[in-house]
Image (tube, grey):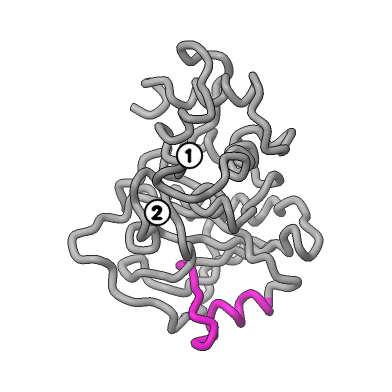
Amino acid sequence: MTLRIVSCPSPNHDARTEGQPVDILVLHYTGMPTADEALARLTDPQAKVSAHYTIGRDGRVFAHVPEDRRAWHAGVSWWAGATNINARSIGIELVNPGHEFGYVPFAEPQIAALIDLAQAILRRHPIPPQRVLGHSDVAPARKEDPGEHFPWKQLAEFGIGLWPAGKNGKGEATPQDLARFGYGLPPHTDVPLDKVITAFQRHFRPSEVNGRWDGECAAALASLLAPRAIG
């Protein structure tokens, strides 16, 4: 599809760290009652938040911050030892009221636009599949987005991110193995383990999000950790 790009600049950005490649893509939902409210906040200098893009439910892509600049979207976050996620990431918001205002499935035109936009971003930047993440993955104590309605499996089918293949890993993974994939666990972070498990489930086992580790979670993580998955 041809992306419908709408210029909607935000003043909320600054310089990236010199020499730091963009190697993470973070996906969010806006979590506000309307698209207009979300766009207003993302472009309000007093709010001090932004993303590189927002995708409306009709598939329009609102361009806020140039990709060579650091947008302010991830906040306090952690992934695979990195803490300044904004400095090394592209942030995309998807219009959705979120859990606070009546969470709904994402719209088909919205996801189609996301697939095209994300594929273009992955061609421009060295972002490996295991570093296509949700906001809740990098900030599990604070965030729930993009949530359990987000079609991660569909994106993986288009080469955007990973999806577990099933019981194909060697043995079953434990909750501590979440750190091997990239999640922040003590002593590196102070996030409770059940919050990290919940974030993992929202991304990779959305059919049941309860914060409790079980055999299905173990098999999913083992599959994700298999060399063929992340090589």
Q: Secondary structure at mark 1?
A: loop
Query: Residue 213, how many percent across, how many down?
Result: 64, 28
Using the image, tell me which numbered label, if any, was put on residue 161.
1
Residue at position x 64%, y 19% from top? 215
- Residue 4: which quarter of the image? bottom right
x, y percent for residue 144: 64, 53
Type of amino acid under label 2: Ile
**Above or below: residue 94 compared with residue 216:** below
Q: Is residue 48 above or below residue 126?
A: below
The residue located at (33%, 58%) in the rendering is 88
Tell me the amino acid under the disc marked 1.
Answer: Gly
- Residue 114, image x and y in percent? 55, 53
Identity of the residue drawn at 44% across and 48% down: 119
Residues at badges 1 and 2 in contact (C-beta under 8 Å)? no
Label for residue 91? none
**108 with respect to 227 (left or right):** right
Q: Which mark is residue 121?
A: 2
The first of marks 1 and 2 along the sequence is: 2
Residue 221 visible? The answer is yes
Q: x, y (%) of residue 128?
A: 36, 40
Q: Nearer the viewer, residue 143 or 31?
A: 143
Q: Residues within 10 Å of mark 1 (few under 14, many from 20)?
A: many
